[in-house]
Amino acid sequence: MEKLIITAAICGAEVTKEQNPAVPYTVDEMVREAVSAAEAGAAILHIHVRHDDGTPTQDRERFREVMDAIRTVLPDIIMIPSTGGAVGMTPEERLQATELYPEMATLDCGTCNFGDEIFENSMPTMRAFGKRMLENHIKPEYECFEMGHVDTIVKMAAKGEVPGAPMQFNFVLGVPGCTPFTPGNLAWLVNAIPAGSTWTGTGVGKAAFPMAEAAISMGGHVRVGFEDNIYLEKGVKARSNGELVAKVVQLAKEHGREIASPAEARRILGLA
Ligand code: KMH
Ligand code: ZN
């Protein structure tokens, strides 16, 4: 099996300091969490940004400030800024990080429930996001929250509406209202992607580590971080993203999988 790529989703758009005081908002806090995740073994950071008061934003200049500050201390790390933002943001607002020409960015593969809200990704929105990523030579990470999202994006790639092979999928399972994590659901998704694709498993909430273990044993990659889960174990809040990454490193060790460096992750993902 390939080495394991660990992505740390260090901040998200929804989780708050009230839920876990280690959730980063400021630039300095983002750098602190990025370093903790990288030192523990993360090769990729999935980036959302906040104003200093914690309000989610997709402001291009805030992304620039945060990503530049992280780049100064972690020159090799792969950064995947979000084009999902927070529920209710406009497509134009969400697309701003693509103006910075990151090597990758997320592309959300369909509309779905998101708790009590609706995360809207219409076909025209996805076409616009695909067009921008083709123009700016950005490799998408295809975020799939529902079974049907895979079929939708594979068909769009076949039509040339979004970047094609090799495709990188992230199966985000366990969002309230969307497909839950079960080993069977994950296996169904993995079987649905084109040969030669890579994939990452993200389990939300209590699914975080069961998903990590399943992905490690099935040859996928893993995302953890405060965006998805704030607990190290039942009732114990993680003090940093690094603690969550370290737990995945330990699981990988138990399954005999080595951890990929950023350079190795670039090769595995076809970026290098
Ligand atoms: N915050 C969620 C509504 C992404 O980053 O592309 C969407 C999200 C997906 O986090
Ligand atoms: Zn995200």
Image (cartoon, rainbow, N blue to C red):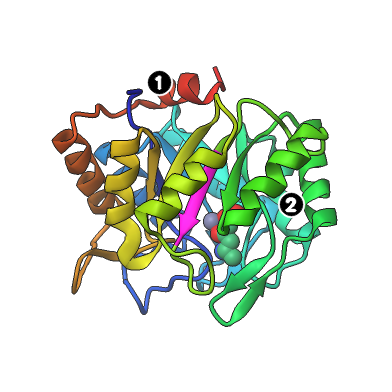
The image quadrant where one finds ligand 2 is bottom right
227 to the left or right of 136? left
In the depicted structure, whether residue 143 falls above or below residue 270: below
The amino acid pointed to by label 2 is Leu
Q: Is mark 2 on a helix, strand or loop?
A: helix
Give the percent coordinates (x, y) of residue 97. 68, 47
Q: Quadrant of the N terminus?
A: top left
Residue 95 got which mark? 2
Give the percent coordinates (x, y) of residue 141. 59, 41
Residue 9 visible in the snapshot: no
Residue located at (48% from left, 55% from top): 172
In the depicted structure, whether residue 235 falls above or below residue 122: below
Q: What element carries label 1?
A: helix
Is residue 94 found inside the magenta-colored segment of the image?
Answer: no
Residue tagged 1: 264
Residue 249 picture quarter: top left
Report, in whole angstroms, how far the alpha carbon at label 1 lies from the one at label 2.
Answer: 28 Å
Range shown magenta: 169-173
Give the percent coordinates (x, y) of residue 33. 35, 51
Q: Residues within 10 Å of mark 2 (few under 14, many from 20)?
A: many
Residue located at (35% from left, 76% from top): 19
